[in-house]
Amino acid sequence: MNNFKKTTLSLVTAVAIGFTGCGSSSTDAGVTTDNTPLPTDTTTNNTPSTDTTLPASITTDMHLTSDKVWLLDGKVIVSNNATLTIDAGTTIAGNTPASFLAIAAGSKLNAIGTLDKPITFTSKKDVDGLSSDNSQGEWGGLILAGNAYTHYSNNVYEADPTINFGSADHAHDGDSSGDLEYVAIKHTGFKVSLDKELNGLSLAGVGSGTKIENIAIIGGADDAIEIWGGTVNLKNVYLYNGSDDSVDTDLGYRGTWENVLVQQVKLDSYNNHDSAAMETGNDGDTITTDDTNATQVHIINMTAYVKGADVSMKFDAGVILENVKFISDNVEIGSAVYYRGADVVNTGAMHVDGAVEFYNSNHALTADNAYAKINNKNDDNLTTAFSDWTLVAGHTALHMGSAGSYALDKNTIPGVNEANIWKGKAGTNDPLEDKTK
């Protein structure tokens, strides 16, 4: 979701819990260790390991090795310009649904896995073998914050108002919040309060100096990835079984996603607007038309298997789409593109610079039933997806590039090369999870 507020937010006690050690001995660094050996691991090096609980606050550089499982017992924040480095093959696990890891603005996360030894963020329940492949909401998620341009002032992360992010200018747009490669994030999501949830991966004001590549978000009780402001780019992204939006961008975010595979499974809503493969917007109609700071995600090569909405657009937003394919089994009319506000693409940020395709297995799509003729946030329904996507002649909202086209057909464009997308499993591009469950 995207309901950021300028005022102080309150958290439920579960998220605001302090650090409590759960082991039998402590080190000077504030890390609590359970020295009881776990069962022998027959899949790796056949040596026992220990679980080590991270401190609630990390303010100096810290290095996590792969010889143990690192536990999050509630909120863990890396701050004070510290860098958290995680070795390839390491597992980080949340003890409770309210457990999450946040990298504050100015600090960094360097989590560089490999195809054979990815880094896994998951739940303790999953580590103990008690999760199903399609589980959601077993721990909170991963948050990266930065100082890149973001709409509004005094932005705070919706699930924890102690995490500030963003700037009113573009001086920090090139900043780095670290490097994430071959990282799987599994079974996330926790509702702190109404419209304030933890996502699989939250990126808040993150700059383009951050590297995010070969990322698999598997099973989430809210959005798979949500981005508020910033300029970070993503490459080779797999988003499986997020219950709300798969790709959600807000607050002036401008960045490029290249090679994206989306698969919706268990959703909060199966209507034509709430749980979308792609949602974009801002919190209110506050941007001047054609403002170059409007939210605008650029997606190159994406295939989305959709059960909710294909594209849901809110205020003052746009997209640039190239070789993007939506394959849906939604039974509702108007589920291809739905507007949720009167002023959606009037900023001039809407572009189709390559081929875009919509297909629905439940009914043959026509312009009359693919694009919604209403919006559900305002009484003013004059600006609708139907008018922008079908009455393009003389219309300035939808900008067609030289190669721009869109079709209501299944086989017009290839979308992403699915075989080349890493799906979270070590050593292969095969799916980590069993889609039959």
Image: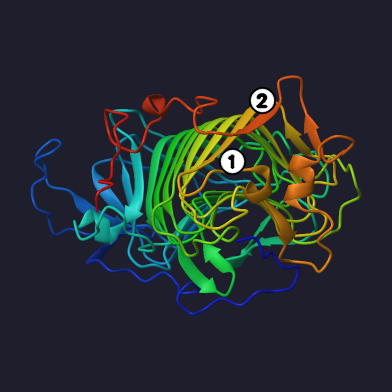
**Residue flagged by tag 1: what amino acid is it?**
Ser
Residue 354's tag is 2
Check disc 1 and report its element: helix, strand or loop. loop
**Residue flagged by tag 2: what amino acid is it?**
Gly
The quadrant holding residue 232 is top right
Left or right position of 289 against 141? right
Residue plotted at (77% across, 53% down): 384
The quadrant holding residue 272 is bottom right
Say whether marks 2 and 1 touch (CB < 8 Å): no
Q: Position of residue 366 (x, y in %)?
A: 63, 43
The quadrant holding residue 37 is bottom left
- Viewer-proximal residue among 12 and 2: 2
Work out whether 208 lies above or below 185: above
Left or right position of 275 against 368? left
Q: Earlier in the sequence, mark 2 or mark 1?
A: 1
Q: Residues within 10 Å of mark 1 (few under 14, many from 20)?
A: many
Residue 396 appears in the picture as rendered? yes
Kindly identify which residue carries mark 1: 177
